[in-house]
Image (tube, helix red, strand yellow):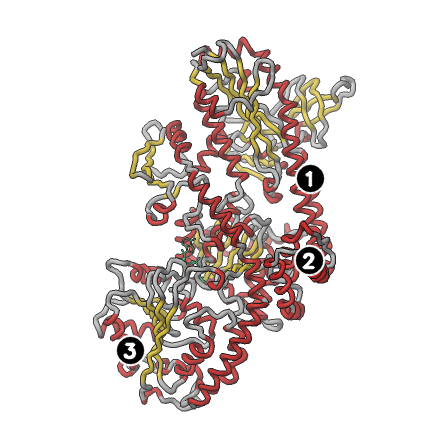
Amino acid sequence: MTDFTPGQRWLSESETELGLGIIKELDYRLVTVEYPAVEEERTYAINNAPLSRVTFDTGDTIRTEGELELTVAEVNELNGLKVYMAHPAGEPDNIQPVPETLLGHTLRLNSAMDRLLSNQLSSNRWFELRVDALNAHCVQQQSRIKGLRGPRIDHIGHQLYIADQVANRYAPRVLLADEVGLGKTIEAGLILHQQLLTGRASRVLVVVPPALVHQWFVEMVRRFNLHFSIFDRERLDALQPETSIKDMLAQIIAEESIAEEKGEAPSNQDNPFLTEQLILCSTDFLAECDIDELAAADWDLLVVDEAHHLEWSEDAPSEGYLRVEAVARQARGLLLLTATPEQLGLESHFARLRLLDPDRYPSLAAFREEQSHYQEIAQLAGDLHDQPSWDADLISRAQALLPDMNIDDDNREAVLAELLDRSGPGRVMFRNTRHNIAGFPLRTVHGYPLPLPDEYRYDSDESLEGQLHPESLYHDDRWCALDPRVSWLEQFFKQHRHDKVLVICASRHTASDLHAHCNYKLGMNIAMFHEDMDLIERDRAAAFFADEVDGAQALICSEIGSEGRNFQFAHHLVLLDLPLNPDLLEQRIGRLDRIGQREDIQIHVPYFEGHAQEVLYRWYHEGMNAFEHTNPAGHDIYLRSRDALEPLLSSDPEYTAIDALVEETRVITDELHTLMETGRDRLLELSSCDSDKADALKAALQEADDSSPLPFMQRVFDRYGVDQEEHSDTAVILKPGPHMRDAFPGLPDEGITMTDDRATALSRDDMQFMTWEHPMVTGSMEMLLGEDRGKAAVSLLKNPRIKAGTLLIEAIYTVESMAPRHLQADRFLPCTVIRHLLDGNGKNISQAISHDGLSQQCHKMDKPLSRKIVSSQKPLLEKLLKGNEAAAAKEAEAIIASSLEAMRKEQSHELARLKALQAKNPAVREEEVTALENQTAQLEKLLSNAQCQLNAVRVIVAGGE
Ligand SMILES: Nc1ncnc2c1ncn2[C@@H]1O[C@H](COP(=O)(O)OP(=O)(O)OP(=O)(O)O)[C@@H](O)[C@H]1O
């Protein structure tokens, strides 16, 4: 077993990018290593920790924490720790003791050169595979469309645009508010995928209504390869260690008293939410769990779906809102999803925006005030967007709204972005509408007036609920026998025998009575979906409805079926009653009117004549045209027509009064639509999608699809012993081969079928979609690059035009910064490859001969001969490689300088924005400005210290023909 001593310096063999580790803790089984350069820790099993001890010998150069470079003159050891006696170059008398604990945390490794010179050689093929993996890794890291190419989705412009805008942000906080069914879940998935793939996030909590837990879980695995753990009460109980109450109390008291002594919050180490990185839970679970514990679980991103339920008012914020707020305050990033952000009114909408960006939205009064200027801003933003010229009038209007900004000819785009950000809903909210996306199916409504049965003639003092849903006053299903909607539905099912029909009604009692009636009395086979069923029953019902061959013709669901679910395979929607809330109506229609719907949508509304139901039907249809078109102003229309509407919902409304209501509603609708189209919605349209950029993204993704990883992976499979079998033109079957020594990333024992063709992947859920972002591909690249194989090789060059015996060196350097993940330094400096090809005089001739061209002529050289060549040429090889270090470093300097420039530009822009907000809003604290400045200083230091390392080297000896 290896002997570890706290304080010793070790290097992770598989993750050298962590820098020089320091042994922090040990027990009989585990060793914990701290990596100060990246502020991370790892714990390994002692008996197979992938660690190498780092020590230095006399004559070596060491670097101290304070970046002092010293030459080792003598090495001493004290209690298992090295103490280096070292001096600055050229000052041999100035000896200073340097305990190894004080060594710098980054390490300039030259393992490729060391391996070459010590004759630890790999074959030519391993070298080529390593270089190809390295190049591919760098291309992926530098790609503009990183994170967008792997998901199994169609390329839809507005989604890609939003994902691209948001995913590249540091700890994004946004409201995804596209209209119903336009793909908010997909946008959130794209953002998560990108953030996780780049390491910007690693801990994610997703909270969704109970009815959507399973759908989210499946969608995340199927489309994004993201495996969430579902947390519920049972899982939490199972995670709690069995402790007696006495032990538990003793433990709590002990922890609290220690924490109190140290003035700290209680320890997080038993927090059950830290046991998984990706957690999915329902809003019900959120309502009952220990919210402090959940909030303390160090989330990089919190995602809340159907966020319109977070109700808030200045005096009485809802419990649900407060709980989300508790987690959102501590989580670094936050994504809120809702198609109907104003469903519960402006206050709640404001409160959600404030959760996202408290600096930008300090008070409700200021928000109201800001909204009143939207038209003026939208006018200017629209002119900036539409007009080619940048005339004096436009400049002076822009200057008036952005007084602190330097406005000139070159920064038109920046001015528009700044305007949308500071004065419009800009950076925080995205909303795409059917109005700005072409290609959606038509919606047609069919009203069916039916006679009101005498049994439903209630007094006018009956509750609104009773008037709207007369069947709800029955305690059993007798109403089914007398309600003409039921016999109408029966006929409807018969006439549409071959169509799928979704039936939505408000209450679970109505749904289950109707279901029982259709199934047991009429002998039909219909599915049901309501809140009293457990999650598994509901998902089974939805799957039964979706089944094209043996499935149910219809699904009858209560209001919970109107949110989030995907039923676009049906195009007939029956609304057995109508909700009072226009946004809820939009949610209902949205089950069918969503991406993937291929037919025009038929909405069927049976209603009672001369009854509240007719009032609602006409109010929606004739007053605001809400069935056939999405209605962005629904909530406001409701607020303004409520006083005229509600009295008519009691019994026997006058027709003249209904006509008047309809007319009044039409006027209000026109007015509000015009206001929105020229104000808020125009601003949102400008900030939510830029079609040129979306088209460019689609084109880039198409190009990326054309460069499949399959040829590279086939070489990897060969090297690691994975069996490959052709499945079809576009797919391959992979299985562990008999000679495979270790597990291969992402390859199950029973094998897997993969396709690199997007269309096949979209139609075949049983296949994995192989892209450069698939976990099998990223995992095998990580495995390959973490190995020593391929770092040093010797090969034989067969080219008749090159004299036999000619020696070349192909040196592959990488430039990378070593920085804590939270700084995301790779935004500015992604891993970059520098290739030099040296001739025998040390001249770099890489421009003349490419790596691929050279590789075609490079062949295997047998091991004994390779070793002989290295041994005999060692001084020359060392001289050439050491001599070239300065040239490589110079090239790296230019790369580092441009990364520094990009970083300074971006950080100063952020700082200017924050200061501008601060001027407008005293809630922007000085500490935030200081934090940003500190972050910039840290990035400045870390990027300046980025290293250029020899990552792989090949000696090439020409051998004639
Ligand atoms: N890019 C895409 N490729 C393939 N399918 C997609 C894509 N975008 C959306 N879909 C499908 O369209 C449907 C609607 O998408 P999604 O559920 O993300 O919409 P939403 O805006 O979240 O809906 P809601 O407003 O109802 O919550 C889903 O079935 C989804 O799988």
Q: Nearer the viewer, residue 341 or 739?
A: 341
Compare marks 3 and 1 and give the one earlier in the sequence: 3
> Is residue 597 shown left or right of residue 858?
left
- Where residue 922 appears, x then y in whole percent? 73, 61
Q: Compute the Cα span from label 3 to label 1.
A: 71 Å
Residue marked by disc 3: 486
Amino acid type for the residue under numbered disc 1: Glu
Q: Residues within 10 Å of mark 2 (few under 14, many from 20)?
A: few
Q: Position of residue 756 (x, y in %)?
A: 38, 40
User: Does label 2 or label 1 sit earlier along the sequence?
Assistant: 2
Task: Please tell me which residue is depicted at 46% across the width and 51% down the height of the picture.
Answer: 239
Identify the residue at horizontal 70%, vertical 45% (top origin). 934
C-alpha distance separating marks 2 and 3: 65 Å
Residue pointed to by mark 1 = 940
- Residue 98 location (% of width, % of height): 71, 26
**Which label lies toward us, 2 or 1?**
2
Q: Amino acid at mark 3?
A: Val
- Quadrant of image for the C terminus: top left
Residue 391 image label: 2
The residue lying toward the viewer, choosing from 672 and 359, is: 672
Tell me the element at label 2: loop
